[in-house]
């Protein structure tokens, strides 16, 4: 553990200066500002302090605005929440507030700010004790009424109080926290989570927590185990089906498909690309989903072998159902599904010592071979204690894809509709069929330049008469 007390040592210099100035202005106005939440927690852990949330006591909202507006540009985030965002910084300024459940889901709360609320009571509305540590940067003082600091130093995730059950999103927050900070969930917290239903959580809020698991989780398997231990895996039936789905122990000594998937996610997390969240999200989701076709295809052969033939193809529909329940981003789903469908291809092509044409066709199907290789590598690493078979399939395919310039994109079509028009053909609905045939020929290596494509089109189609589609391959 890098430190044992809060500080501002991992706040950027600009935000640190602004934060201290805000605290001084509020102090002079008669209030007291405490840093709380992720900014305190991450500072203790020696991580960059990016979430800087100040909670101001003993000063009404209007006086907080008056104290700061002469020096800073402020944006009010919802009258009921009473949060002021300080423009150009990562700093939010808010008041203590009372909350009461007013309906189903994450957003249905009646909220009233109260600058005179006792700090222990304000802290009790927070989700986990590690997020309920308060730090006064002016006086270098800590307030920790619920024991968050010893929990954090012990690597323990514990809910703050009885109000925890009012917000079902907190279970998924627990999932990503245990993965991000390698925490051991308190048994009482796990038991409490078992009593909470998902209710009407918005898909975007659910997806935000899954994204944090995949993008920031040091050990994603911990998060998935938390999901299972709390019973919340039942809300994701495509994942729940992996539990107990057997595999052939010769190739998967680690156990069932669930166990394999957890190992694969940890392998993926070990090799995430720095500062490339989109790429990591696409690949991470593909790793999470890559074997979802196995429960529906696994069979035990007469000789005792366990096989899941064509599970990668069968998994596309299952993964689509899972992803569309998780996010309303169709483009993201469409980027993930080909990686699920083709995650066996690197090993298969390597074994066959496949042709350049086969690699080009693979690039057309998946879009990004570099992404596919990351998924296949995580799959290969997810079978301890076996070594990372089937690599050298990875380096082999990587080299071929780079030489063919299809590593990060499929080959661009060398013959376009405008080329056919320039060659004398009349445009029409038949153009699509013609261009598709020409592109398949390009992938097969029958031409590799624009002029070669034009020459091939002339040989294929003959003179530009009629619909121009009488020629045969």
Image (cartoon, grey):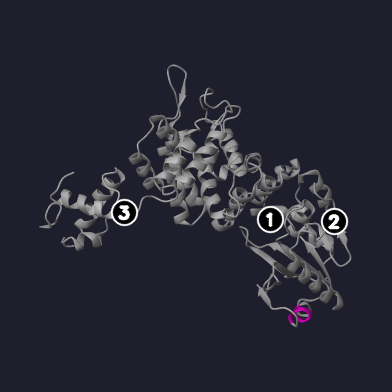
Q: Locate the C terminus by quadrant.
A: top left
On the image, the x and y values in percent for residue 411 come to: 36, 50
The answer to whether the residue labelled 1 contacts the one labelled 2, judged by CB atoms less than 8 Å apart, is no
Mark 2 or mark 3: which is in front? Answer: 3
The answer to whether the residue labelled 1 contacts the one labelled 3, judged by CB atoms less than 8 Å apart, is no
- Which mark sits nearer the N-terminus, 1 or 3? 1
Q: How many marks overall?
A: 3
Mark 1 lies on a secondary structure that is helix
> What number is the disc on residue 82?
none
Q: Residue at x 40, y 38 (%)?
A: 313
Q: Residue at x 84, y 51 (%)?
A: 4
Residue range of the region highlighted in magenta in the rendering = 65-69
Question: Any magenta on residue 23?
Answer: no
Task: Find the distance from the CA under tag 1 to the CA under tag 3.
Answer: 55 Å
Q: Is residue 354 above or below residue 212?
A: above
On the image, the x and y values in percent for residue 86 come to: 70, 73
Query: Does the magenta stretch mainly form a helix, a strand or a loop?
Result: helix
Pointer 2: what residue? 144
> What number is the disc on residue 166?
1
Q: Is residue 177 above or below residue 81?
A: above
């Amino acid at each position: 553990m890098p430190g044992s007390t809060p500080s501002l040592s991992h706040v950027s210099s600009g935000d640190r200066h602004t934060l201290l100035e805000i605290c001084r202005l509020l102090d002079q106005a008669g209030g007291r500002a405490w840093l709380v939440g992720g900014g305190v927690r991450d500072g203790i852990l020696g991580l960059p302090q990016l979430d800087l949330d100040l909670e101001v006591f003993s000063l009404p909202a209007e006086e907080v605005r008056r104290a700061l507006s002469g020096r800073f540009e402020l944006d009010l985030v919802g009258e009921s929440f009473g949060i002021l965002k300080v423009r150009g910084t990562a700093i939010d300024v808010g008041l203590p507030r009372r909350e009461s459940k007013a309906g189903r889901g994450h957003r249905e709360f009646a909220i009233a700010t109260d600058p005179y609320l006792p700090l222990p009571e304000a802290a009790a509305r927070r989700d986990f004790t590690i997020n309920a540590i308060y730090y006064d940067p002016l006086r270098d003082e800590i307030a920790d009424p619920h024991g968050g600091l010893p929990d954090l130093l012990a690597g323990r995730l514990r809910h703050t109080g009885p109000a925890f059950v009012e917000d079902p999103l907190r279970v998924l927050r627990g999932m990503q926290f245990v993965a991000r900070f390698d925490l051991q969930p308190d048994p009482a917290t796990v038991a409490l989570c078992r009593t909470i239903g998902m209710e009407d959580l918005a898909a975007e809020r659910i997806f935000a927590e899954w994204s944090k698991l995949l993008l920031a989780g040091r050990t994603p398997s911990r998060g998935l185990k938390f999901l299972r231990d709390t019973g919340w895996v039942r809300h994701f039936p495509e994942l729940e089906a992996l539990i107990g789905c057997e595999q052939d122990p010769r190739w998967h000594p680690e156990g069932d498909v669930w166990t394999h998937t957890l190992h694969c996610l940890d392998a993926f997390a070990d090799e995430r690309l720095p500062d490339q969240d989109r790429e990591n999200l696409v690949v991470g989701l593909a790793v999470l989903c890559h074997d979802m076709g196995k429960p529906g295809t696994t069979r035990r052969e007469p000789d005792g072998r366990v096989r899941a033939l064509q599970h990668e193809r069968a998994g596309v529909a299952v993964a689509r159902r899972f992803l569309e329940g998780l996010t309303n981003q169709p483009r993201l789903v469409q980027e993930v599904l080909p990686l699920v469908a083709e995650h066996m291809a690197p090993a298969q092509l390597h074994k066959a010592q496949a042709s350049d044409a086969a690699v080009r066709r693979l690039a057309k199907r998946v879009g990004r071979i570099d992404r596919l290789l990351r998924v296949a590598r995580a799959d290969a690493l997810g079978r301890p204690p076996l070594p990372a078979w089937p690599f050298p399939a990875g380096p082999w395919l990587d080299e071929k894809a780079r030489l063919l310039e299809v590593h990060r994109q499929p080959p661009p079509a060398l013959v376009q509709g405008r080329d056919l028009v320039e060659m004398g053909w009349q445009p029409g609905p038949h153009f699509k069929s013609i261009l598709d045939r020409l592109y398949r020929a390009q992938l097969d290596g029958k031409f590799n330049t624009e002029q070669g494509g034009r020459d091939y089109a002339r040989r294929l189609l003959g003179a530009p008469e009629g619909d121009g589609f009488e020629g045969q391959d």
